[in-house]
Image (cartoon, rainbow, N blue to C red):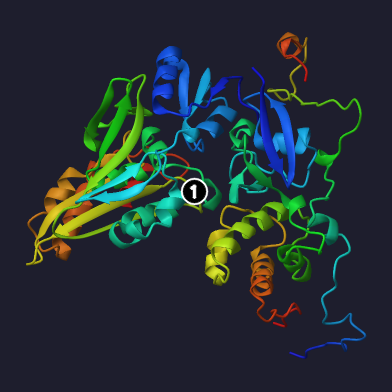
Amino acid sequence: MIPEQFGYSAPTSLQEAFSLLQELGEDAKILAGGHSLIPMMKLRLATPFHLIDINKIPGLAYIREEGNTLKIGALTREVDLEESTLIHDKYPIFIDASKLIADPQVRNFGTLGGNIAHGDAANDHPAVMIALRAVVEISGAGGSRTVAIDDFFHGFYMTAIEQGEILTEIRISRPQSKFGSAYHKVERKVGDYATAGVAIALGMDDKGICTYAGIGLTNVNATPMRAERSEAALIGTNLNAEAINLAARHASEDCQPSSDLRGDEEYKRHQ
Amino acid sequence: MIKCKTSKEIGGMGHSMKRKEDARFIQGHGNYIDDIKLPGMLYMKIVRRPYAYAKIKNIDASKALAIPAW
Amino acid sequence: MKKTINIKLNGTDHSVEVEPRKLLVHLIREDLSMTGTHIGCDTTSCGACTVLIDGRSAKSCTILAIQADGKEITTVEGLATAGGLHPLQEGFKENHGLQCGFCTPGMMIRAVELLGKNPNPTESEIRWGISGNLCRCTGYNNIVKAIQYASAKMRGAELPSTEPEFV
């Protein structure tokens, strides 16, 4: 399958990319890892007039900690997350999620920024971002702004990124308390989208009382979803079975899955 | 179970046979149908009828003909 | 619309004019006539089109040729050297790691990167490592054995037996 014709530019600086975006307007699409966009273009589900390939712009791929904040460049590949010792030691939730995304070849190219900016509730990282209460940096010709993850996803394939802007960085502030995180998804086979997925981050104080709860759900709503009532059900408890069961029940009541080939609504709620 | 195996020198029973065709497959010379290129070769796509047992009254190929051949 | 790109394919430099929409796999198979890289599913699932781009395994049906500008590409044709077959090629041959052979080039190319990063993988690491490559006839047991054989050979370790197992 061959995509519809399109123009192509590979700018070597962000400024150059911004001016191209402004010049070309809505018909231009950013090409990062391309492993969601190119399949869509081959199936002619997407027919951008022009692609702006940001892979030749230096300085967009990095993983570093500044004080209590983890900063990840938007062009960081899934494989780099998987192989990072910093991520391994402190943010294993990314390893959980990255390992479940597609397959090794796709993870060699797919980027964290692309996974989020695509705005697809079936992708895995959005739920992780919700659990970790990430802040994303969006840059344009006029400078950069930050958006909390809860204000980022507007609808199906729609995000807070405006015309002329590029998602450039993901920031995560680590809670001070004892902190743990994990991601789990039910999938039919390796590489499939989630039937349902859940990202959880929990913080506890010295007495074992839950002080931080972040729960994001994958593919059970039109947008990546925060399980607010479930989070509230955990905070202030010692995370006993009763609190966890209540949180799980809230999550299953509050999600809005649609029935599809991966299972009907009832089945997905049960996950 | 009785293990039936001839000696190494004789081979055959209980021994694996090396395949003759593997050499080209593992070097990328499989020569599958799609690998064959002949001079003047054209590509074809079959458009099947959307209705069973319907009568074909005419075929409008104008859209297909409008696509530049390459 | 066409742009000229420069790529190195299996050690040879090429300068080719491409339309931006041309996929890398079509450039390799059609323009450069290396047909060892196959198109299986054409939807990023099967891995038959796997090639190395600057050492990273990639599904070439999901990469634009123009994205490979300035890169070094390795396909199955680039595995063997003057000294003979690559240990992976030998492993697949010795362990009956193929039948129809369609998935084999992608499988071997993927395994090159896998063994490069992890020279002595466990069986489950191998299975996880080739989870983006589908085989529809041989089954994965002999493919795993083939990769274990290549791993042993490349490390200079004792080669595992290639005799069939009695059950």
User: Above or below — where is C78 with respect to C152?
Assistant: above
Query: At 78% from the left edge and 66% from the top edge, which residue is drawn?
Result: C93
Picture quadrant of residue C24: top right
List x then y, in percent, for residue B55.
77, 16
Left or right relative to B27: residue A253: left
Picture quadrant of residue A158: top left
Mark 1, secondary structure of its residue? helix
Quadrant location of the N terminus of chain C in the rendered image: top right
Q: Nearer the viewer, residue C143 or B49?
A: C143
Residue A150 shows in this picture: yes
Left or right relative to C67: residue A270: left
User: Above or below — where is C121 with respect to C63?
Assistant: below
List x then y, in percent, for residue B59.
77, 12
Query: At 59% from the left edge and 38% from the top edge, which residue is drawn?
Result: C62
Chain hosting mark 1: A
**Mark 1 closeness class: few <14, some 14–19, many ≥20 residues within 10 Å:** many
Quadrant location of the C terminus of chain C in the rendered image: bottom right
Query: At 70% from the left edge and 41% from the top edge, which residue is drawn?
Result: C8
User: Above or below — where is B56 with respect to A110?
Assistant: above
List x then y, in percent, for residue B31.
85, 46
Left or right relative to A109: residue A248: left
Picture quadrant of residue C119: bottom right
List x then y, in percent, for residue A117.
37, 33
Residue at image mark 1: A107
Q: Nearer the viewer, residue A192 or C90?
A: C90
The count of marks equals 1
Residue C49 shows in this picture: no
Which amino acid type is shown beneath numbered disc 1? Arg
